[in-house]
């Protein structure tokens, strides 16, 4: 895909009153600046190349996290670029001014924390077989017979039980954080991950979240390794579906 020289790469949007954030380099080590329109400012940098690489993903997140240290920021999808400053104003900021302003106000003072769980597969299987003697017997039969049919049947039963456990373990996390988080969102996971839940939390309640996560860890530690990620910008809750009609690398 051919891009115009010196197109404008867009990272996110902040309030114009917060536009004087410290300098930071973005994609392709280009300096990031704040492009203002009315009460908003888009974080942008010049870009001329036609392909993005892994290091550019890191640069995208680095800019947003840097801005997040100094202001409320709404992220724009990775790979978003426009032809000029005028296009950023005309297609992103101006038509979405009211909505973006409302989101910035709603997200003020809030952070995202992710609680992730990953199954210890040996402990997981041992627990399933202990709770379900019929599966333990099916496993013994499959080991004795060695037939594909028995192996498939065992795998299907175990997979269904893992799904039930995943739902149960996720509920433990949701209940533990209920009343502390402003909002919660379950992210999709694949085995051996147990859950990945994003929590929208007031900055001054981080310690409360840490205590609740400690309770979850103590409750589930036998079969699940729990990690606690954050604070980060509220990507899962304010990811900019801004109807800007932007072109993007994908």
Image (spheres, helix red, strand yellow):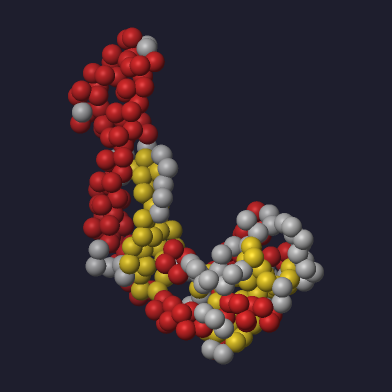
Q: Nearer the viewer, residue 70 or 207?
A: 70
Q: Is residue 238 above or below residue 146?
A: below
How many numbered circles does the render carry? Answer: 0
**Residue at (52% x, 79% y) in the render:** 96
Q: Residue furthest top?
A: 145
Q: Is residue 231 above or below residue 154?
A: below
Q: Is residue 55 left or right of residue 49?
A: left
**Residue at (33% x, 28% y) in the render:** 156
Residue 233: x and y in percent read 48, 69
Q: Is residue 244 left or right of residue 184?
A: right
Quarter of the picture containing the C terminus is bottom right
**Residue at (75% x, 64% y) in the render:** 3
Tell me, yes or no, if residue 53 can be seen here. yes
Q: Is residue 196 left or right of residue 139?
A: right
Residue 123: x and y in percent read 32, 33
Quarter of the picture containing the N terminus is bottom right
Q: Quarter-wise, where is residue 118 in the image?
A: top left
Tell me, yes or no, if residue 125 can be seen here. no
Residue 131: x and y in percent read 20, 31
**Residue at (26% x, 52% y) in the render:** 171
Q: Is residue 15 above or below residue 44?
A: below
Q: Quarter-wise, where is residue 30 in the image?
A: bottom right
Q: Residue furthest right?
A: 5
Residue 163: x and y in percent read 31, 40
Q: Nearer the viewer, residue 217 or 129?
A: 129
């Amino acid at each position: 895909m051919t891009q115009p020289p010196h197109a404008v790469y867009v990272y996110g949007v902040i309030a114009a009153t917060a536009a004087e954030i410290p300098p930071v380099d973005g994609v392709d080590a280009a300096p990031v600046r704040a492009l203002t329109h009315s009460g908003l400012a888009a974080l942008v940098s010049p870009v001329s190349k036609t392909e993005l690489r892994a290091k550019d993903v890191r640069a995208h997140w680095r800019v947003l996290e840097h801005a997040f240290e100094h202001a409320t920021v709404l992220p724009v999808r990775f790979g978003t670029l426009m032809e000029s400053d005028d296009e950023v104003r005309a297609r992103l900021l101006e038509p979405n001014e009211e909505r973006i302003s409302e989101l910035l106000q709603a997200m003020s003072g809030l952070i995202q924390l992710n609680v992730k769980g990953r199954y210890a597969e040996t402990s997981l299987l041992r627990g399933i077989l202990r709770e379900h003697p019929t599966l333990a017997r099916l496993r013994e039969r499959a080991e004795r017979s060695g037939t594909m049919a028995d192996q498939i049947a065992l795998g299907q039963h175990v997979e269904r039980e893992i799904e039930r456990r995943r739902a149960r373990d996720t509920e433990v996390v949701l209940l533990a954080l209920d009343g502390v988080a402003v909002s919660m969102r379950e992210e999709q996971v694949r085995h051996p991950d147990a859950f990945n839940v994003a929590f929208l939390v007031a900055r001054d309640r981080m310690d409360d979240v840490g205590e609740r996560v400690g309770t979850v860890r103590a409750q589930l530690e036998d079969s699940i390794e729990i990690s606690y990620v954050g604070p980060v910008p509220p990507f899962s809750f304010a990811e900019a579906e801004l109807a800007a009609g932007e072109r993007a690398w994908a």
